[in-house]
């Protein structure tokens, strides 16, 4: 168990938290939610002892071990991957290293023997003999191949490092597990594995995530941060949303009834206060009126952008034809003979672990890269708007937000452009912010504004939810579902994929394509997925006709 007791944190004159009292108990997974800037990551740092409070303290059951998902991706660059994972249980790792040092001595003394015996006993109690196999199991579950387990961390790419650091946090059955955005940079297969791990985890978990589907799958309680307070709700994210909305509706209804009663009493007092025969009744009603207190309904600090993609032109039947398209990058064939045709009702999710292939395909469709073989053709009625995974070049300039967006608008009117920015929470003076100083979330909202103002009838998204808060992700999800045109997209957000796509395409590790008209959940449960996984656990290359 871990608890915060009268915790207050002030940053300058601003109180980020004020007298927070909350207890996190064993057997529960708590989803810590709140608007951007509410202090979710800060509160995890308070719980882990990385940040001192202004007032109050954090207490933990004596003897329990706390584990945290590290955010520094370079901290363990000089350590092997397996060692990095085992270091998640620092005491066990220290015992292993001390044992190795003792046994490596040439002049092994009696004192060394006694010390080695003590260490061996503690090592056995901590299941040390299973440490390497347990670490390997975690790594394999998250998609880190066995041939990488003995590499140095610095030899891994960014996504692989994230997975190793997550395995490090999960290692050794910690009593309390703090996870800050654990699904960031994970593919959907790795997220599914993590969901199952946490569902079966018996100890205390506190997790910050913008992935609504993930929170619904793993959480037993929601801890909602709003206005410096933390309120606990039993159940998952959807239950929290319904409960919180119901509470607001109930308070508004109670206030409405009170207001009607106030009006009724005021009318009686006004009519009969000067009437001697009714004066006692009027006085009684005055006292009743004074006792009625309206509930204070504090608006949430959450802000939802309004995302609405409206095409200027209706799309025709011919949308996109891809014929025998192939591409090799650095000697690896990432796209191999892709052939398909899109219709005017298609909303296609590109899924799977082959992220380079998906990004490459989008870049080819948008003319940023040439295929090695094959061709593609957009229909004459189509117009495209593109959200790239890396949009940094859009922000390397001295323009203000309004100036930048005006450059993409057919209507060169600042008021018109500011209307689009206002929908994306850029109010007032925000419009004169320089593009180069914007935060990650602000940049994403700029790119979505650009897509909205384009009036395109085909939208392409390459991981659009990176850097977005949950409110913006929800708004984007709603905008994608309402869009009447064609969408091609990749996303790690399970709920966006499930609720938006009516067609699933997976580019396999060998560059081949699986194309199914189905929902994502149905695809995951399909025989095709099971057969694909069996093919790729078999030695050698799969036969082409098996795909």
Image: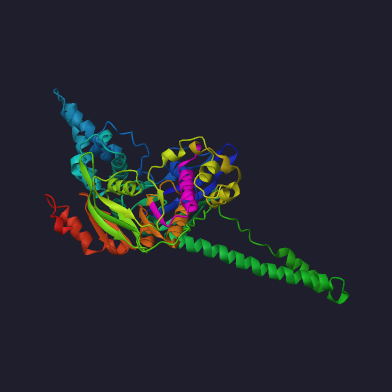
Q: Is residue 453 magenta?
A: yes
Give percent across and percent down for residue 510: 20, 49
Give percent across and percent down for residue 334: 24, 46
Give percent across and percent down for residue 483: 44, 60
**Can residue 49 be seen from the camera position used here?**
no
Q: Residue furthest bottom?
A: 277
Total residue callouts? 0
Q: Residue furthest top?
A: 107
Q: Nearer the viewer, residue 45 or 318?
A: 318
Is 101 situated left or right of 72 in this image? left
Q: Magenta region: which residues?
A: 437-460
Is 485 situated left or right of 291 in this image? left
Splitting the image into 4 quarters, where does residue 200 fall?
bottom left
Is 315 situated left or right of 111 in this image? right
- Up-down relation of residue 96 to residue 355 (above or below): above
Judged by its main secondary structure, the magenta piece is helix
Task: Name the quadrant of the C terminus.
Answer: bottom left
Is 343 situated left or right of 290 in this image? left
Q: Is residue 103 magenta?
A: no
**Can residue 308 be seen from the camera position used here?**
yes
Q: Residue at x 38, y 51 (%)?
A: 461
Give percent across and percent down for residue 369: 31, 43
């Amino acid at each position: 168990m871990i608890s915060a007791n009268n915790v207050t944190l002030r940053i300058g004159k601003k109180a980020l938290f004020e007298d927070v009292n909350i207890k996190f108990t064993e057997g529960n997974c708590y989803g810590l939610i709140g608007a951007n800037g509410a202090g979710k990551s800060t509160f995890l740092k308070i719980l882990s002892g990385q940040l001192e409070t202004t007032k109050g303290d954090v207490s933990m059951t004596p003897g329990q071990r706390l584990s945290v998902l590290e955010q520094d991706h370079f901290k363990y660059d000089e350590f092997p991957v397996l060692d990095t994972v085992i270091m998640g249980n620092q005491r066990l790792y220290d015992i292993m290293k001390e044992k190795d040092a003792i046994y490596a001595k040439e002049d092994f003394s009696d004192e060394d023997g006694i010390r080695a015996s003590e260490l061996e006993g503690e090592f056995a109690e901590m299941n040390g003999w299973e440490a390497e196999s347990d670490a390997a199991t975690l790594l394999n579950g998250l998609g880190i191949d066995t041939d990488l387990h003995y590499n140095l961390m610095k030899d891994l790419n960014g996504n692989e490092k994230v997975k190793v650091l997550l395995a490090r946090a999960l290692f050794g059955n910690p009593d309390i597990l703090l996870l800050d955005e654990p699904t960031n940079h994970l593919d959907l297969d790795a997220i599914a594995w993590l969901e199952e791990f946490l569902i079966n985890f018996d100890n205390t978990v506190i997790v910050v995530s913008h992935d609504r589907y993930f929170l619904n799958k793993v959480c037993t309680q929601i801890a909602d941060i709003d206005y410096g307070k933390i309120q606990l709700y039993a159940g998952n994210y959807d239950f929290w949303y319904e409960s919180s909305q119901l509470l607001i509706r109930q308070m508004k209804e109670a206030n409405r009834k009170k207001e009607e009663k106030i009006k009724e009493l005021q009318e009686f007092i006004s009519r009969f206060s000067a009437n001697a025969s009714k004066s006692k009744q009027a006085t009684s009603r005055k006292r009743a009126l004074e006792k009625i207190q309206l509930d204070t309904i504090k608006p949430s600090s959450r802000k939802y952008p309004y995302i609405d993609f409206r095409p200027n032109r209706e799309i025709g039947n011919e949308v996109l034809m891809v014929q025998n398209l192939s591409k090799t990058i650095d000697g690896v064939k990432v796209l191999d003979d892709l052939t398909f045709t899109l219709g005017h009702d298609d909303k296609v999710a590109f899924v799977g672990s082959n992220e380079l292939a998906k990004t490459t395909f989008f870049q080819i469709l948008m003319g940023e890269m040439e295929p090695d073989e094959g061709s593609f053709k957009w229909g004459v009625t189509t117009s495209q708007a593109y959200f790239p995974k890396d949009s940094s070049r859009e922000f390397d300039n001295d323009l203000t937000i309004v100036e930048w967006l005006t450059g993409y608008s057919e209507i060169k009117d600042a008021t018109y452009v500011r209307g689009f920015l206002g929908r994306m929470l850029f109010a007032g003076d925000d419009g004169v912010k320089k593009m180069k100083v914007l935060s990650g979330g602000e940049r994403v909202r700029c790119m979505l504004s650009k897509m909205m103002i384009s009036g395109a009838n085909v939208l392409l998204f390459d991981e659009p939810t990176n850097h977005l808060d949950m409110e913006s992700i929800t708004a984007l999800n709603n905008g994608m579902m309402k869009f009447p045109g064609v969408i091609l997209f990749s996303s790690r957000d399970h709920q966006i994929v499930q609720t938006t796509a009516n067609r699933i395409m997976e580019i396999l590790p060998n560059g081949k394509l699986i194309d199914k008209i189905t929902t994502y959940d149905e695809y995951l449960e399909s025989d095709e997925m099971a057969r694909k996984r069996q093919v790729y656990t078999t030695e050698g290359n799969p036969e082409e006709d098996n795909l």
